[in-house]
């Protein structure tokens, strides 16, 4: 949904498909910019089957219910009747219709495993691990003897938890790619290890000054990566023990990462982040140590930057 618009104006442009019957909706992963208006689309295309990985379904259901809560608060704060554009009940109904798909298995749009004949001559799709966040997938479409591959958001490098993408190696006729970096190449001397070292050193300098560290990260994906980096920093004695604070949605996403640690491709498979790192869980309103007044994360950031507050923290500042 567009963050600067409200109601219908915040929705994606569904006009090109408004008069067409859609057979299937394929979801690459559960970040809000990919799944945030799925219940609305399902209402407008009631006959379309919806496919995603099982993990994306679990995460997506949680995120969409959180969206309803956010829209309800916006309705109260700005006095608009345009929100919420879907409800908790509609979210539950939508999620009950989702089809869970395993990786690396060609499927027909009926949801059944595709036969060799369908793979050769029919319309089939297949999910491949995209290495972006838990449950993320690239999608290979086969039809009329040709192939189209949609990457979704993709990461080819191993992260702290997520392993890099494993995409098809065969010839692709049409490639649709999403990427954050675009046409900007990494610096020639860039390494992940060096960037992690810089992060650890920056946090240590802040702690030495008696300060706090506020890290704005998405609840899904980056929160878990940062927690895992903190785990590594402690084991390597780059940082001392310190309290960690995360938002409520971040804790829900992290719990899903922990539950699925042994059933998904990942590094540090035995690491249970909530148990090992024991973060304090704060709601979307934060209390500042020098005041009893509640603050938004942005208010807290400004006050942390402007005040010599003793303490150490890590907080969620975004929700998808």
Image (spheres, grey):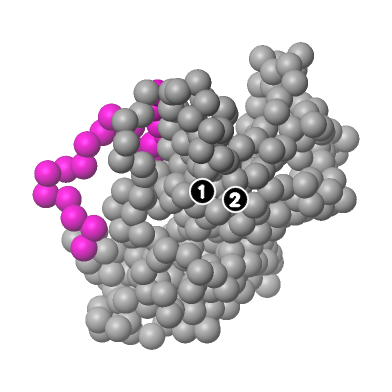
Residue plotted at (84% across, 48% down)? 93
From this view, report whether residue 180 is shown above or below residue 160.
above
Asked if residue 17 shows in the view, the reply is yes
Q: Is residue 312 magenta?
A: no
Q: Nearer the viewer, residue 184 or 214?
A: 184
Report x, y in % for residue 146.
43, 23
Q: Is residue 254 left or right of residue 177?
A: right
Residue plotted at (82% across, 41% down)? 86
Q: Secondary structure at mark 2?
A: strand
Q: Secondary structure at mark 1?
A: loop
According to the image, label 1 marks what residue? Answer: 105
Residue plotted at (38% across, 85% down)? 241
Q: Main secondary structure of the magenta part?
A: loop
Asked whether disc 1 touches disc 2, contact meaning CB atoms under 8 Å apart, the reply is: yes
Q: Is residue 298 left or right of residue 14?
A: left
Q: Quadrant of residue 310?
A: bottom left
Identify the image quadrant of the N terminus: top right
Asked if residue 310 shows in the view, the reply is no
Local packing at callout 2 (Cα closer than 10 Å; few below 14, some 14-19, many 20+) is many
Report x, y in % for residue 185.
22, 36
Q: Nearer the viewer, residue 171 or 191?
A: 171
Report x, y in % for residue 197.
22, 66
Give the number of callouts. 2
Q: Which residues are magenta?
A: 174-193
The single residue placed furthest to the left in the displayed view is: 189
Q: Which mark is residue 101?
A: 2
Report x, y in % for residue 156.
31, 48
Residue plotted at (39% across, 27% down)? 175
- Give the CA separation, mark 1 to mark 2: 8 Å
Q: Is residue 235 left or right of residue 253?
A: left
Q: Nearer the viewer, residue 31 or 98?
A: 98
């Amino acid at each position: 949904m567009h963050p600067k618009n409200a109601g219908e104006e915040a929705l994606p442009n569904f006009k090109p498909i408004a008069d067409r019957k859609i057979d299937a909706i394929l979801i690459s992963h559960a970040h809000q910019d990919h799944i945030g208006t799925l219940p609305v689309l399902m209402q407008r295309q009631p006959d379309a089957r919806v496919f995603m990985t099982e993990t994306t379904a679990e995460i997506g259901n949680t995120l969409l219910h959180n969206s309803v809560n956010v829209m309800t608060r916006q309705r109260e704060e700005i006095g608009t009747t345009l929100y919420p554009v879907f409800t908790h009940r509609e979210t539950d109904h939508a999620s009950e219709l989702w089809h869970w798909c395993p990786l690396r298995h060609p499927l027909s749009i009926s949801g059944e495993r595709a036969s060799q004949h369908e793979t050769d001559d029919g319309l089939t799709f297949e999910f491949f691990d995209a290495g972006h966040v838990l449950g993320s997938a690239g999608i290979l479409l086969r039809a009329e003897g040709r192939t189209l591959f949609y990457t979704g958001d993709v990461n080819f490098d191993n992260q702290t938890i997520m392993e890099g993408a494993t995409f098809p190696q065969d010839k692709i006729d049409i490639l649709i790619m999403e990427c954050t970096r675009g046409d900007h190449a990494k610096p020639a001397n860039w390494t992940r290890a060096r960037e992690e070292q810089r992060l650890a050193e920056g946090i240590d300098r802040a702690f030495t000054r008696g300060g706090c560290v506020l890290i704005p990260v998405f609840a899904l994906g980056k929160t878990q990566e940062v927690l895992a980096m903190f785990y590594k920093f402690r084991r390597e004695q780059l940082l001392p023990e310190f309290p960690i604070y995360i938002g409520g949605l971040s804790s829900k996403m992290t719990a899903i990462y922990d539950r699925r640690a042994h059933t998904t491709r990942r590094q540090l498979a035995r690491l249970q982040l909530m148990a090992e790192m024991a973060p304090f869980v704060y709601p979307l309103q934060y209390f500042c140590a020098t005041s009893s007044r509640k603050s938004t994360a942005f208010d807290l950031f400004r006050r942390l930057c402007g005040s010599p507050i003793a303490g150490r923290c890590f907080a969620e500042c975004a929700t998808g």
